[in-house]
Image (cartoon, rainbow, N blue to C red):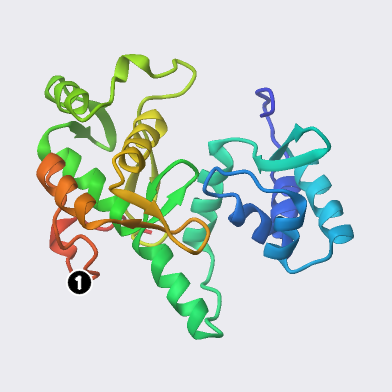
Amino acid sequence: MWNNATETDIAEVASAIGDPSRTKVLRALADGGVLPASALAAEAGVSLSTISAHLTRLREAKLLTVEHDGRHRYYRLASSDVARALEELARIARPLPVRSLRDGVRAQALLRARLCYDHLAGRLGVALLAALVDRGVLANTAGAYRITPTGLDELGAFGIDVAEFSRRRPAIRYCVDWGENRHHLAGALGAAIANRLFELAWLRRGRARRVVQLTEAGRTGLHTTFGVPLDWDDPSGAANHPARLEN
């Protein structure tokens, strides 16, 4: 991203994000994946010539990067910070109108379980972080999370070696989930847990972009391993989670 400075041009970034078509592009890439321009044009509902101008604008604002594979170009979010910014903006934005049954189903699926860049979000992500704290894998002191000695052992038994995390990325970060208004786990640990869940086939990608689904083996496994409640996906199960954050 940009070098540190005393002032930053928030207006430029806000303007780049502010176009509805460009917002759709960023949301399509919010799971940390890569897509060609043709797929992003379809997501945004615009022509290839139009998407080219939008992608240029997003790259100039340092929101996207491009990867070359021969003659093909693939786009991805510039960093996890872009995904975090989208998550924060979603918290203060008004909901989009639901215009079809398909839109409603997809919206509920995103609220239930989704990827926020490379880590879990939605009710599943919130329930996982709460369970890790309750289990003693993580300690929470005034919103600052850290891995406990017991947590190192439990994570190791689960197949995650914290010592292998890159020093360039914090082991633990969190996002304020826009749907639940509670924390979900990000950082290197959040990514490692999500990757491990996919490896174990406890988690699978849904039909809609960014949506993920916990398998029955995953539901049982997360409950046994980390104490995630079996009814984590019950919207009325607020007693299983920390109190909502104040807006």
Toward the right, the furthest residue is: 49
Quadrant location of the C terminus?
bottom left
Toward the bottom, the furthest residue is: 100
Dot 1, crowdedness within 10 Å: few (<14), some or many (≥20)? few
- Taking the image as shown, residue 47 lies to the left or right of residue 213, namely right
Residue toward you, 169 or 113: 113
Residue 242 seen in the current view: no
Relative to 189, residue 203 above or below: below
| Location of residue 123 (image quadrant) | bottom left
Expressed as whole percent of the image width and height from the top left, the position of residue 46 reads 79, 67
Q: Residue at x 44, y 59 (%)?
A: 211
- Taking the image as shown, residue 28 lies to the left or right of residue 156, namely right
Identify the secondary structure beneath mark 1.
loop
| Location of residue 225 (image quadrant) | top left
Relative to 142, residue 210 above or below: below
- Taking the image as shown, residue 26 lies to the left or right of residue 228, namely right
Relative to 190, residue 6 above or below: above
Quadrant location of the N terminus?
top right
Q: Residue at x 57, y 44 (%)?
A: 33
Expressed as whole percent of the image width and height from the top left, the position of residue 105 reads 43, 76
Expressed as whole percent of the image width and height from the top left, the position of residue 150 reads 11, 23
Question: Residue flagged by tag 1: what amino acid is it?
Answer: Ser
Q: Residue at x 43, y 60 (%)?
A: 206
Expressed as whole percent of the image width and height from the top left, the position of residue 134 reads 12, 42
The mark total stands at 1
Residue toward you, 188 or 209: 209
For disc 1, the marked residue is: 236
Q: Residue at x 51, y 77 (%)?
A: 103
- Taking the image as shown, residue 100 lies to the left or right of residue 239, namely right
Residue 209 seen in the current view: yes
| Location of residue 124 (image quadrant) | bottom left
